[in-house]
Amino acid sequence: MQKGFEEDALPEQAPPVGTAPEVLPAEPPEGAIRRLEEQLREAQERHLRLAAEFDNFRKRVARERIELADRAQAALVLRTAHACMASKTGSSERPSAVRE
């Protein structure tokens, strides 16, 4: 069971009304600055890596799309050549020069 917020707690689990919340010790300003700067560096690095990964994905998909179109066009040319040669010879066999 996941621990919920106080608002989500059942009445018997909720803290009594009028009690002060637990006070955590304050972090020194220098420590907070260092911690936040490190978190910022990590977030920037993750963002940069993700942007590079997406750019590589975009380029790969574009290459694959071109390759697929080229293959489809080559297959169409082969089928058309076969049909043309078959209609001239009256045969439904593929000539050896046009075999896939």
Image (cartoon, rainbow, N blue to C red):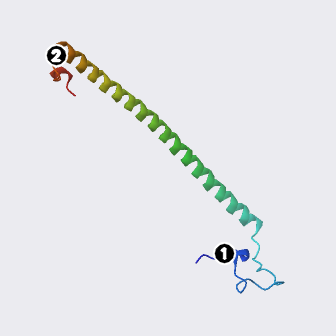
Instruction: Spot the residue most to the top.
Output: 88
**Residue carrying label 1:** 4
Closer to us: 72 or 84: 84
Q: Earlier in the sequence, mark 1 or mark 2?
A: 1
Quadrant where the N terminus lies? bottom right
Residue 62 lies, in percent from the top left, at: 46, 34
Regarding mark 1 in the picture, which secondary structure is present there? loop
The relative height of residue 99 versus residue 44 in the rendered view (above or below) is above
Q: Which residue is at a point 82% across and 84% down the rendered structure image?
A: 17
**Residue carrying label 2:** 90
Q: Residues within 10 Å of mark 1 (few under 14, many from 20)?
A: few
Mark 2 residue type: Gly
Residue 14 lies, in percent from the top left, at: 73, 83
Mark 1 residue type: Gly
Closer to us: 20 or 4: 4
Closer to us: 18 or 41: 18
Task: Give the quadrant of residue 21.
Answer: bottom right
